Structure formats: C-alpha cells, structure tokens
C-alpha cells in the first residue's frame, strides 16, 4: 500500500521558518494536500494542490513540490502554529480512489 | 454555512457493531463525494472510506474492507458508516469530510471506543 513519509517532529523559535517535508513515490504525478490539527479539534486544510492556500489561511503558509517530495513552509512561525501537520495524497490515477495521510509532524514553536 | 455533524459514536465490545451518521447542511450534498477519516493519538489521521456523489462507487482502506460499509442518503443529506466486527484498533475519533479531492470541510468528530 502507498505510504507518505514525514518527520515525526520539527521545532523552531518564533519568527523562524518551519519546513515540513512529505515524501511519496507518486508525488511527481499527484498533488499533495496539507492539514493541521490542534489538540481536540478537527483538521484544517492549509494547502491544496501542492501550492494553493484556502481563503482564511495566513500568507505565511506556503507549499511546494519537487520530485518525490512536497514541502510545507511556515514563514515566520508563530506560537499559535503549534499543531500536528499531515500531508495527504493518493497514488491512484482516479482522483477519488484510495488516499493516505502521512504519519504526521508535530510542530513545536518555542 | 457548511456544517457537518457526526453522531452515533460510543462504547462497544470487540466484535460489536455501530452505525455512525453525518448530517450535512449548507451545501448541495448530492454534488460531492464524501469521506470518513479517523484519528488516534498514536497513529494520527487515517483515511477510512469515500463514496461517490450518487453512491455508485465506494473505496475502503484495507484494514476495514469487509467490515465497514459507507453509504449515503441524498434525500436526507446524510452520510453513514456501518461498522461491524469492531476491533480494539478501530478505537478512534471518526470525522466525516466533504471531498473535492481536498477535504475542505470537516465535522467535529465522534468518538468510538472498542473494548477488548
């Protein structure tokens, strides 16, 4: 089965840039999506189709993808950005086939 | 305003069954795929199943195939997850989400606890 690999944790100081990577063999052909989830809350979409930011998501959140790796960057991370971050994608040619989440990355900002 | 409200979670013995519901409002339910996702503190988020707008196509993660059934009633703007032969490892918060490929709206989740 398809897997997406993320680092378990990333730690930065407030104001620094945080980069969270997601590795998957199908990412050259398939979009990556990014969610953050704070404790006890539902996940929130922060990046879709590799680079697009939904309305209401701060400009400091950006996404990129190159080869088998997608990256979420938080430029000038703030304490309120502390959360678990998950990438999401599929290796199916059918956009509504089987999907997977990465294992998640705990972002600490302190 | 788009709203998704899950219900039906609870405590169940291993081998038991539950039916989760997701009531949708604020959008034309019948025009969207819908997805169930679950979350456990140890494993993170796991995609569980999705269903086409008219219910004619469904997909499942391998670990629930043959035990879970996703269904919908477009007349009632409702999504369901029928869970049979439940195992301890199915313990999780279950979320329904609107599916455009991205999952742009989520419910608040409902907790399922399976006791072994």
Image (cartoon, helix red, strand yellow):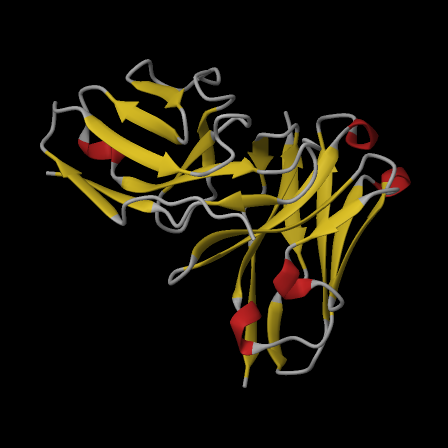
Residue located 42% across and 60% down the image: B43
Where B92 sits versus B31, above or below?
below
Left or right: where B64 falls relative to A13: right
User: B108 and B44: which one is in front?
Assistant: B44
Task: Residue A5 in the image: state x and y as whole percent.
Answer: 38, 45
Where A73 sits versus A85, above or below?
above
Where B45 sits versus A13, above or below?
below
| Image quadrant where one finds the N terminus of chain B | top right
Where B38 sits versus B73, above or below?
below
Q: Residue furthest bottom?
A: B116
- Quarter of the image where one finds residue B15: bottom right
Residue located 47% across and 43% down the image: A42
User: A104 and B75: which one is in front?
Assistant: A104
User: A57 and B35: which one is in front?
Assistant: B35
Left or right: where B46 falls relative to B3: left
- Quarter of the image where one finds residue A12: top left
Task: Residue A100 in the image: state x and y as whole percent.
Answer: 54, 45
Residue located 23% across and 46% down the image: A9
């Amino acid at each position: 089965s398809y897997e997406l690999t993320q680092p378990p944790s990333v730690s930065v100081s407030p104001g620094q840039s945080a980069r969270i990577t997601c590795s998957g063999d199908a990412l050259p052909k398939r979009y990556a999506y990014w969610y953050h989830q704070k404790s006890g809350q539902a996940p929130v979409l922060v990046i879709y189709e590799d680079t697009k930011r939904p309305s209401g998501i701060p400009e400091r959140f950006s996404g990129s993808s190159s080869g088998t790796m997608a990256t979420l960057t938080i430029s000038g991370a703030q304490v309120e950005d502390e959360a678990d971050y998950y990438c999401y994608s599929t290796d199916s040619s059918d956009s509504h086939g089987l999907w997977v989440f990465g294992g998640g990355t705990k972002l600490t900002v302190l | 305003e788009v709203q998704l409200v899950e219900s039906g979670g609870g405590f169940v013995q291993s081998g038991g069954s539950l039916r989760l519901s997701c009531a949708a409002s604020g959008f034309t339910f019948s025009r969207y795929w819908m997805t169930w996702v679950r979350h456990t503190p140890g494993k993170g988020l796991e995609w569980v199943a999705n269903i086409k707008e008219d219910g004619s196509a469904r997909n499942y993660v391998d670990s629930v195939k043959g035990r879970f059934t996703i269904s919908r009633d477009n007349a009632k703007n409702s999504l369901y997850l029928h869970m049979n032969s439940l195992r301890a490892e199915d313990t999780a918060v279950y979320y329904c989400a609107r599916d455009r490929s991205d999952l742009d709206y989520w419910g608040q989740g409902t907790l399922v606890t399976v006791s072994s």
